[in-house]
Amino acid sequence: METILLQWSFDFGASLLFIALISVYFKLSSNQLLKGAGLYFAGCFLMLILALSPLHFLGMHYLLSAYMVMHILLLLICGPLILMGIPRETENKTIKSLSWFFNRYPWIGWLSGIGLMWFWHIPSIFDASFPKQHDLLSISPLAFLHLATLLLAGVFFSWPILGPHKSLRIHPLVGVVYLFTACVGCSVLGLFLTFAPPTLYHHYYMSDEFGFSTLIKNGWDISRGNDQQMAGLTMWVPCCFIYLSGCMILFFKWMNEKEEDSINSSKLKRNYL
C-alpha cells in the first residue's frame, strides 16, 4: 500500500486558477516584477501546492480536520499574501474602486470571509462540494467554486486592513473590532463543529476507495468523532490566534501613530513660540 505522503495529484481547476492569478498580476504591474511580487506569488504557489498535496487528499477522502486546515490556509494565509503582493498605490481603476468600496463598506469584506466560511460548512453544501469523479482533465464546478471563493474571500476579508492604498484602509481601532468580531464568528462555528454529532458530514462515511481508513483509525488513532472535534478546535484556536494577533498589531500601530502625532504637535507649538 502506498503511503499517504505520496498522494500528490493534479488538479485541473486549481491549475487554471493559478494561471489566471499570475496573469492578473502581470496585467496590474504592466508585465513587471514590482515590490511585493514575492508575496503575491507565494500566495499563489501555496494555493496550488495545497490543492495538489497529500493534505488535500486527506481532506477530500478521509479527514475533516485536514480540510479545515486547508480552509484556514486559503482564507487567512493565501488570500492576504496575494493582497499584500498587489502593486502598492496602483492606478488601476478596478483596484482603486475596490479599495474605496471596502473602506466605505468594510462589513462586506467581513461577511465575505466569515459568511463564506459558514456557508461552506453547511452539511448539505459541504457534502455536495466534493467532485463525484477524479478524472485529471475534468472540473467539478462546485469544487472549483469552493476553492476560488475561499481564496477570493481571503482577499476581500483582508482588503479593509491590508489594501494596496494605505489612505483607504480602515482606522486601526475599527480594524481591531473587525478582527475581534471575526474571531467570535469563527469561535462559534468551531464550537458547533466540536460538539456536533460525528455524523454531521456524510461525505466521510463513503467507501474506503484508497484503503487508508485502517491506518487512520488504528495507526493514527483518529475516529470520526475525534476528527470532527479536531476540526472544530482547529477552526476555533488557530483562527482566533491569527485574528487576535492582528488586533494587537493594529492597536500598537494606533498607539504609535497617536504618539507620533503628539510629538509632531509639540514640535509645531515650540516652533510657533
Image (tube, grey):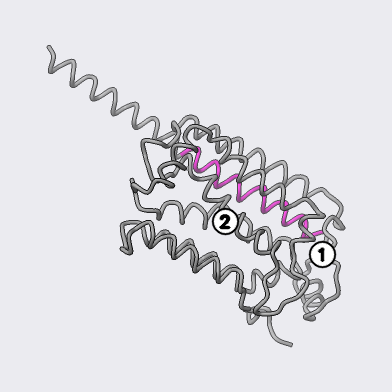
**Residue placed at 87% from the left, 52% from the top?**
197
SS of the residue under disc 2:
helix
**Mark 1 highlights which residue?**
203
Under mark 1, the amino acid is His
Please tell me the numbered disc located at residue 151. Answer: 2
Q: Is residue 147 magenta?
A: no
User: Left or right of 21: which side holds 223?
Assistant: right
What residue appears at the point 42 percent right and 37 percent down from the top-left corner?
169
Confirm whether the magenta stretch covers residue 234.
yes
Number of residues whose C-alpha sits closer than 10 Å to that of mark 1, classed few (under 14), some (14–19) or many (20 or more): some
Q: Is residue 218 left or right of residue 142?
A: right
Q: Range of the magenta residues?
A: 225-248
Query: Of marks 2 and 1, which one's residue comes earlier in the chain?
Result: 2
Q: Quadrant of the N terminus?
A: bottom right
**Image coords of residue 14 (percent x, y):** 58, 68
Q: Tell me what residue is drawn at x 84 percent, y 55 percent.
A: 200
Residue 83 in picture, x, y percent from top left:
45, 52
Say which amino acid is labelled 2: Leu
Element carrying mark 1 = helix
Q: Is residue 198 above or below residue 62?
A: above
